[in-house]
Amino acid sequence: MLRALGVILVLVLALAGWCYLNILADPIVRRATIAVPGWPAGAAPLRVALISDVHVQGPDMPPERVARIVEQVNAQHPDIVLLAGDFVGDRVLGTRDYSDAEIAAPLARLSAPLGVYAVLGNHDYTYRGIPRMWEALERVGIRVLDNRVQHVGVLTLAGIGDVHSGHAAVPAVVLAAARMPGPILAFMHSPDVIPRLPSQFGVVLAGHTHCGQIVLPWYGQLASASRYGDRYRCGVIHESGRTIVVGAGWGTSIVPFRLGAPPDWWLVTVGPAQALAKVRAAR
């Protein structure tokens, strides 16, 4: 009996070690191309980097590591960078928390000709309050678009506040976007707000779910961060004529483990269908 318990303990510790090593891997660069109806004639496609759930916290995601990953993002030369919230850590097993300025500093190195934009996540609101993380990002040149709309290139970029902390002002964003020219690209922290969006919001980018963070073979995700379960868990999702991209993020929440859901960020190319066919053929 004791021998069997010993074997089980060794296996559990080995699995825990493997799950911890998974969070230390460099985020995977995932790619998607999305044809956008109404793309202005003659306008070139745009490459949009989607980064979410950085969760800056020791020991696994210190600012120094964030800075290294930022360089990997810059090496892909995105036209726009979108940060989909949850910059702060929440783990009780974390060895160090960082100030708002320490979190924002490495993100300030992100480079994109059309700008770097952010929305806040539920942990940013819950653990830091509304002004603090917002102000820290704005101070380093990152424009926060919680419930704001901005014309960026040929796009109408619509940022929606976090739904889980009660900051999603969907009607105001929809009204503001309707007054702007160009196709709409929306981004938010949690995809749970998507069913409340009208059909004009045809391209939506989000994070929050960590793609399940711990996803067991033959079972699925151990726990869901979404009230919709697996519906918006991960990756490219096509729903009612809308294309949704949900990223796994860089960091972790609750526990410093990942299994079956490696860290990632997305490089999403949006543009007219004909031009995107050439992009796919060139890969």
Image (cartoon, helix red, strand yellow):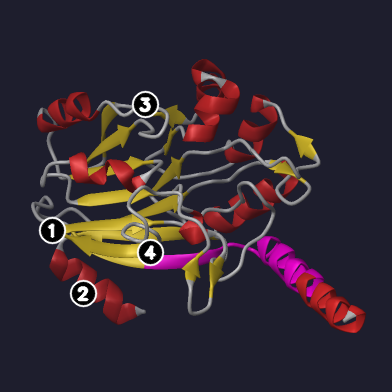
Q: Inspect this view and state whether residue 76 appears.
A: no
Residue drawn at 39 percent across, 49 percent down: 226
Which residue type does callout 3 highlight? Answer: Gly
Q: CA distance from mark 4 to mark 2?
A: 20 Å
Question: Is the residue marked by circle 1 packed among few (<14), some (14-19), or many (20+) residues within 10 Å?
Answer: few
Q: Nearer the viewer, mark 1 or mark 3?
A: 3
Q: Disc 4 marks which residue?
A: 235
Q: Residue furthest top?
A: 131
Q: Secondary structure at mark 4?
A: strand
**Mark 4–mark 2 contact, CB under 8 Å?**
no
Which residue type does callout 2 highlight? Answer: Ala
**Between disc 4 and disc 3, whose residue precedes?**
3
Q: Nearer the viewer, mark 3 or mark 2?
A: 3
Q: Residue furthest front?
A: 1
**Mark 1–mark 3 contact, CB under 8 Å?**
no
Q: CA distance from mark 4 to mark 3?
A: 25 Å
Q: Position of residue 66 (x, y in %)?
A: 66, 47
Using the image, tell me which numbered label, if any, was put on residue 240.
1
Using the image, tell me which numbered label, if any, was put on residue 277.
2
**Between disc 1 and disc 4, whose residue precedes?**
4
Image quarter of the C terminus: bottom left
**Between disc 1 and disc 3, whose residue precedes?**
3
Q: State whether residue 214 is above or below residue 92.
A: below
| Residue 58, picture quadrant | top right
Q: Disc 3 marks which residue?
A: 166
